[in-house]
Amino acid sequence: MIRFSGVSKTYPNGVQGLRDVSFHIPKGQFVFLTGHSGAGKSSILSLIIAEQQPTFGEVRVSGYQCGKLSANEVPRLRRKLGIVFQDFRLLEYRTIEENVAFALEVTGAPRQAIPSRVIRVLTRVGLASKAKAYPKELSGGEQQRVAIARALVNDPPILIADEPTGNLDERATRGIFQLLQQINGGGTVVVMATHNLALVRDTGYRVIELKGGEVVFDSGQDTPAAGPA
């Protein structure tokens, strides 16, 4: 589903974000991206979502060659991706259900189908009872669950999570991680960038560690998928 082949990325200011990175993430796998700030995690994620293009090498995601996408193809790729950020990025003056519905509206989903899809995904993340609440009325962990619901509402085969627990306390972190495990158990690829090594150590999921833009450790290209193949 995601394949990097000899990928290097040099930014306009001369900083080299990635150096000859290669890996393959198959269907159903849960993968941690680890490494210190500046190691290359964000560069990998930005290439996966076609926010950046590789300087050298090839990035393929869900059948798309990301470095050669036209302006019209980028939104098509992103409909196959759910993206969750550290800072939630919720719309403050919209209710929880309106925040999630917005992700359907911008992709042109049939209006009559939106309410049922929103409630379904809010139920999945345990927040159906908070549908009419506003973000400021929720805890940090609940806000991140809303962000995950928004990312899932279009049923993407791949979920990208960029430090999703970075702003949360330990209890909320565990809850979010358990939710991501459940999502992966349903067959969704989960790629999670994190600094939380304690969280990584407690699991048997694949770990790709980066340092100076290079992969310095990969617990296995052939690690069995956690969900259905």
Image (cartoon, rainbow, N blue to C red):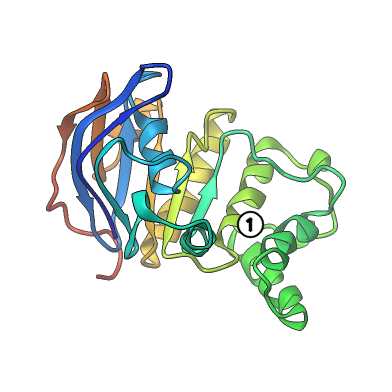
Give the secondary structure at mark 1: helix
Amino acid of disc 1? Arg
- Count of numbered circles in the view: 1
The x and y percentages for residue 110 are: 71, 80
Question: At 68% from the left edge and 72% from the top edge, which residue is drawn?
Answer: 108
Image quarter in which the C terminus is found: bottom left
Task: Indicate left or right for 52 with 60 as reference.
Answer: right
Image quadrant in which you'd find residue 113: bottom right
The x and y percentages for residue 214 are: 21, 26
Q: On screen, 73 above or below 67?
A: below
Question: At 36% from the left edge and 53% from the top edge, which residue is drawn?
Answer: 68
Query: Residue 184 or 101: which is nearer the viewer?
Result: 101
Q: On screen, 119 above or below 161?
A: below
Residue identified by numbered label 1: 150
Query: Residue 144 or 62: which is nearer the viewer?
Result: 62
- Mark 1 residue crowding within 10 angstroms, few (<14) / some (14–19) / many (20+): many
Question: At 85% from the left edge and 58% from the top edge, which residue is drawn?
Answer: 132
Task: Indicate left or right for 121 with 138 as reference.
Answer: left
Image quadrant in which you'd find residue 9: top left
The x and y percentages for residue 175 are: 53, 44
Q: On screen, 176 above or below 108?
A: above
Question: At 28% from the left edge and 70% from the top edge, which residue is drawn?
Answer: 228
Task: Indicate left or right for 61 with 146 as reference.
Answer: left
